[in-house]
Amino acid sequence: MSTNVGTPTVPLQPVRTRRPRKRRSTTMRKHRMLYFMVIPGLVWFIMFRAIPMGGILIAFQDYNIFRGFLESEWVGLKHFRYLFQYQDFYRVFYNSMIIAIQEILIGFPAPIILALALNEVRRSAVKRSLQTVLYLPYFFSWVMIAALFFQIFSMNGIVNQIISAFGGDRVLLVQREWFFRPMIIISGLYRNSGYGTIIYLAAIAGIDPQLYEAAMIDGANRFQRILLITVPSILPTALVLLLLRIGGLMNFGFDRIYNFLTPMTFGVGDVFDTYVFRVGLTEGQYSLTTAIGLFQGFVAFGMVWVVNQMMRRQGGGLW
Amino acid sequence: MSTLQRDSRTERAFLLMNEIMLGLIALVMLYPLVHTLAVSFSAGPAAEAGRVYIWPVGFQTTGWRFVVQDRMLHRAFLNSVYISVVGVAGSLAFTALFAYPLSRSYFTPRKAISLIVVISLVIRYPLIPYFLSIRSYGLMNNINVLIYTHLVIEFNLIIMRTFFQGLPDELEEAALMEGANHFHILTRIVLPLSKPVLATLALFFAVQYWNMFLHPLMFLRDADLMPIQIRLRQFIAQSAALQETVEAGVGRGSAQLNRRTIEAAVTIFATLPILMLYPFLQRHFVKGALLGSVKG
């Protein structure tokens, strides 16, 4: 390798090995402050993420608050065996799955359609005011949204007035079991579909305008351009978002369900999050509900994995 | 674009229909808010009978007088202001301090720590162990627990780190030559250059703190520590219970007479900060939603 024949190779070697080490130690010293800066964040992650994650182990214990984690008795899969023989578990699992699937089928495509429609609005003042209104509900809390919905769907609310104008009987919709799931889906559309368009509108804005020009020269009309250029162009974005959404499905958001639940709609509205909260936190069945949480995590991961495999077969997927 | 090929008649009809449809959707979405605002200024019986739509009927300020007088409501509002203001400041400072080292390419543990962040973004902590660990830290019934638990939000951390990575290196190199340490670089050079991302994240954090619901429900016990959302929820639950008694035919007492206007006033009151800030913030959250998607 070495072309400098004149110099002996032996004295060169220690220099070669020492130099990188020396440089590394000086960068360490020069950037020592960085290591100090990262400490609070790391401590935070250990306290509020790592330790709670490790706490999953109490699913395999009979956790006793007086004995604590270290002293509680290990019971293996007892809680999981109990779960699968338990009526409530299947009800909650079923409720969670149904709402999750409806949410995917309706809540996921809604912002895409809305973005396609918004993109066709040519007058920018109109477009901007539409966006201002559509994005607003995203910043409302679920408590607030539930309050708004309870007003709209009350006995004398506007929905019942429309129903009775068409000759129907007034019903207190928020307390009817059959209306619970539609109400959850509608409230999700209300809050999220407008804000969800932002990312798709950006994806649409990134499409090369030459594609549209070429299509127009070829005689494609507006619908064909949407269907054959816009939709395929935002598909990759949509697939990634779909995957992320499925991952978050089983932990659907406690606030969203809890604020719409009434004693009358418990049968259809009780999902994993509300069940864990009620039975775990208020009744103190820590180990059992941690087992449910673990199960929930596995289901979510399984669903993401399955969908990712399906996407990979189509040449996409996250990993 | 239109010079190439004029829109056909059907296409123009489609564009018009499209705008009308979107306008209707926007009106439907705006209605609940405007309606609730109108109810809050209406006479109780008119609101109860459903005669209020988008304009107050029998103008009356009973609902808002209740808001002005109810001590617990003020307390809850101030609690929310406290956690929002202190929380946003704390979260921004904490996030910046953590994001800065992670954005430096020569910081060796950068990749490992970033991986931890991404993992905890994807796999959510289970609720019960989360509750038990925080209780074991002795943070129960301490209003600051709402802030401690939200000092870092993984998504926001990634946004800030990505922004820091995009800043030019030259300034920092020059400052290092001059003998400045990294803390000075962060506070004197990087943060002043990061105003756009700080504004965006301040908005995200503020909304998060203001709308917080599950955390106070889990960790707080005392009524006078509760933030506004919990108080609002109590009003709605009471109202729903009252509605049942009305349905069951139990008499309409004077307490029930104005419950709907009071509930409406409290609802608007609890959302007032968001409604007032919203017009100024639209630019920022659009940017934020896109920043997150880059490396989200």
Image: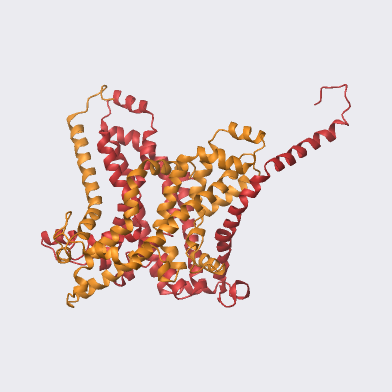
Chain colours: A red, B orange
Q: Position of residue A45 (x, y in %)?
A: 57, 56
Going 22% across and 39% down the picture, which residue do you hit? B19
Q: Position of residue B200 (x, y in %)?
A: 43, 44
Q: Is residue B244 above or below residue A208?
A: below
Going 32% across and 41% down the picture, which residue do you hit? A115
User: Quarter-wise, where is residue A163 in the image?
Assistant: bottom left
Going 34% across and 65% down the picture, which residue do you hit? B73
Q: Nearer the viewer, residue B246 or B188?
A: B188
Q: Position of residue A42 (x, y in %)?
A: 60, 54
Q: Is residue A40 above or below residue A277?
A: above
Regarding residue B153, the answer to whether it shows in the image is: no
Q: Is residue B5 above or below residue A44?
A: above
Q: Position of residue B99 (x, y in %)?
A: 56, 46
Q: How many marks?
A: 0
User: Quarter-wise, where is residue A63 in the image?
Assistant: bottom right
Q: Nearer the viewer, residue A128 or B114?
A: A128
